[in-house]
Amino acid sequence: MAISLQPLADRVVVKPIEREEITKGGIVLPDTVKEKPQEGKVLAVGPGRLTEDGKRMAMDVKVGDVVLYVKYGGTEIKIDGEELMILSENDILAKKASKK
């Protein structure tokens, strides 16, 4: 998915990955009971934040990474019907290792 949104500084645009709506026991969970997703795929990455001496810090994540982020961090936005999150790199807790 290509988006026409370029995050600034150390911001990252993430598409949340929804969890399974059915429990292992076969119970269907309604939207009111489901937890907020904390995992998502990175769609766009900013250039990195500036240090006090004006140098650009490289980002630790890249487009395509699957990341885990803080539960109530970031800003939720909707673009072309897609729900996305804009997070600071500080709100990202980990990224999943790529399978080789």
Image (tube, grey):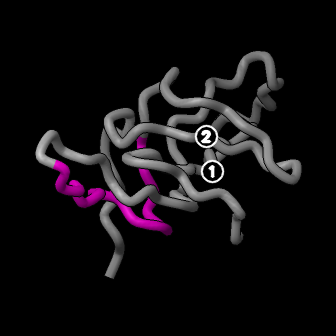
Q: Which mark is residue 85?
A: 2
* Camera-nearest residue between 18 and 41: 41
The amino acid sitting under disc 1 is Lys
User: Is 5 covered by the magenta stretch?
Assistant: no
Give the residue drawn at x 81%, y 25%.
31
Left or right of 13? Residue 76 is right
Q: Residue furthest bottom?
A: 100
Highlighted range, magenta? 54-68
Q: Is residue 60 magenta?
A: yes
- Give the mark nearest the N terminus, 2 or 1: 1
| In the rendered image, the vertical position of residue 54 relative to residue 4, given as above or below | above
Q: Residues within 10 Å of mark 1 (few under 14, many from 20)?
A: many
Q: Is 64 on the left-hand or right-hand side of 17?
A: left
Q: Circles 2 and 1: CB distance less than 8 Å?
A: yes
Towards the viewer: 100 or 63: 63
Q: Which residue is mark 1?
A: 15
Q: Amino acid at mark 2?
A: Met
